Each structure stands twice: as structure tokens, then as C-alpha cells.
Image (cartoon, grey):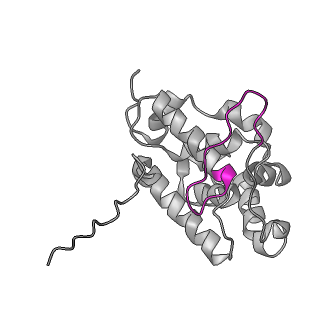
């Protein structure tokens, strides 16, 4: 039987953020979501993303020196989040980055993402677009995290001695991201 009442149209974004993730980044984001849920955090934040990037993306680990002590120390800080370092974050949403005069405000966060994590994703998407890529890679998201000096991920990098200040210069040009994975770089 057909209903005479029209069904409400589904409200969908033109392109869901997840549709833009490489397979590797989809694994990273799924891991960050699980980590946030396990720890009882309401939102996926930049520290969750950093933790999952370091666990799951070899290209991002390579930027910190691979499997060396620098990476281990950062992971150690992140693992202590629920029992020590980061306890002050519990029950607090990672706030939106401030926008300066004349700058556009950060876009609304995807459901379940802190405003700063959403901003990092936007920066990552811009990097992918700048190289003509269909997919956002983990290194793009790492660059998005590093672009926000006030986010939890950068706070962890600094506190662990990983020196977030020197990392942006170590990032490959957006066009060279695929070559880090062994793929052919996209020509511009």
C-alpha cells in the first residue's frame, strides 16, 4: 500500500568526509573512533587521531623517525592519556581554533569529532585537493594536526619531546604524498 504522506528526504552532504579517505586513512579514523569510545570520550579529538596515525600509518611514523625512540615516547604519552597525561581533558571537548580578524570560522565538526579534529580534516582535504588526489592520506591529516599549534596532538608531541615545531618542514609537499607509500605521485 502506498502512503499519501511523502517521506522526509534524507539530508546528506554532497560528499561525506569518509568518502574522501584513502583505505589507510579509513583504518586510522576507525581506530581513533574506537579509542575515543573505549576511553569514554564524547568526541574523537586530535590526540585520538595522532595515536591512531602513529599506530596504523607507516608514512606518518616515518616522519617521526620510524619505529625509534621518538615514536615510542609519543605513543607512551598517548597511552597514558586515561591514567595520567591528558586526564584534564576528560569530559572536556577540544575547543574550536580561534579565527583571527578577517578569517573564516572553522566549519562545523562532523558528528562525533571535536572542532579542532574537524579543522585538521579540512586542512587534510585541502592538501589532497591541491595535488589533484581523490583521497585524503594519513600524511595529509598529520599536516592538518600540525597546522593547529593549540590542538591536543601538538601538545602531546611537544610534551613528549618529539618537537612538533620542526615537523612541518619535514612534511612532504602535498603532491609527493603518494610517493611516500610507494605509489606513483600525481602529476599536476
Q: Of 144 and 67, which appears nearest the observer?
A: 144
Q: Quadrant of residue 54?
A: bottom right
Residue 20 located left or right of residue 167: left
Position in image of residue 131 (x %, y %): 46, 28
Q: Which residues are magenta?
A: 98-117
Residue found at x 74% / y 62%: 93
Residue 140 located left or right of residue 181: right
Residue 133 drawn above or below residue 76? above
Residue 16 located left or right of residue 161: left
Residue found at x 44% / y 49%: 21
Q: Residue furthest front?
A: 4
Position in image of residue 113 (x %, y %): 61, 59
Q: Residue furthest left?
A: 1
Residue 157 drawn above or below residue 182? below
Residue 40 drawn above or below residue 23? below
Q: In which quadrant of the rendered image does the N terminus lie?
A: bottom left
Position in image of residue 128 (x %, y %): 48, 35
Q: Is residue 115 magenta?
A: yes
Residue found at x 53% / y 31%: 174
Q: Of 124 and 185, which appears nearest the observer?
A: 124
Amino acid at each position: 500500500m502506498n502512503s499519501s504522506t511523502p517521506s522526509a528526504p534524507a539530508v546528506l552532504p554532497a560528499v561525506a568526509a569518509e568518502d574522501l579517505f584513502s583505505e589507510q586513512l579509513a583504518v586510522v579514523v576507525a581506530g581513533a573512533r574506537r579509542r575515543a569510545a573505549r576511553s569514554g570520550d564524547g568526541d574523537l579529538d586530535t590526540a585520538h587521531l595522532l595515536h591512531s596515525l602513529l599506530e596504523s600509518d607507516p608514512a606518518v611514523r616515518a616522519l617521526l623517525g620510524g619505529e625509534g625512540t621518538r615514536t615510542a615516547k609519543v605513543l607512551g604519552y598517548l597511552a597514558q592519556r586515561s591514567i595520567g597525561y591528558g586526564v584534564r581533558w576528560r569530559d572536556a571537548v577540544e575547543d574550536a581554533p580561534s579565527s583571527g580578524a578577517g578569517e573564516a570560522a572553522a566549519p562545523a565538526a562532523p558528528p562525533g569529532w571535536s572542532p579542532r579534529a574537524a579543522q585538521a580534516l579540512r586542512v587534510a582535504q585541502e592538501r589532497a585537493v591541491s595535488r589533484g588526489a581523490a583521497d585524503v592520506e594519513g600524511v595529509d591529516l598529520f599536516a592538518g594536526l600540525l597546522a593547529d599549534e593549540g590542538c591536543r596532538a601538538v601538545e602531546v608531541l611537544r610534551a613528549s619531546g618529539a618537537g612538533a615545531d620542526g615537523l612541518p618542514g619535514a612534511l612532504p609537499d602535498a603532491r609527493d604524498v603518494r610517493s611516500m607509500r610507494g605509489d606513483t605521485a600525481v602529476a599536476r
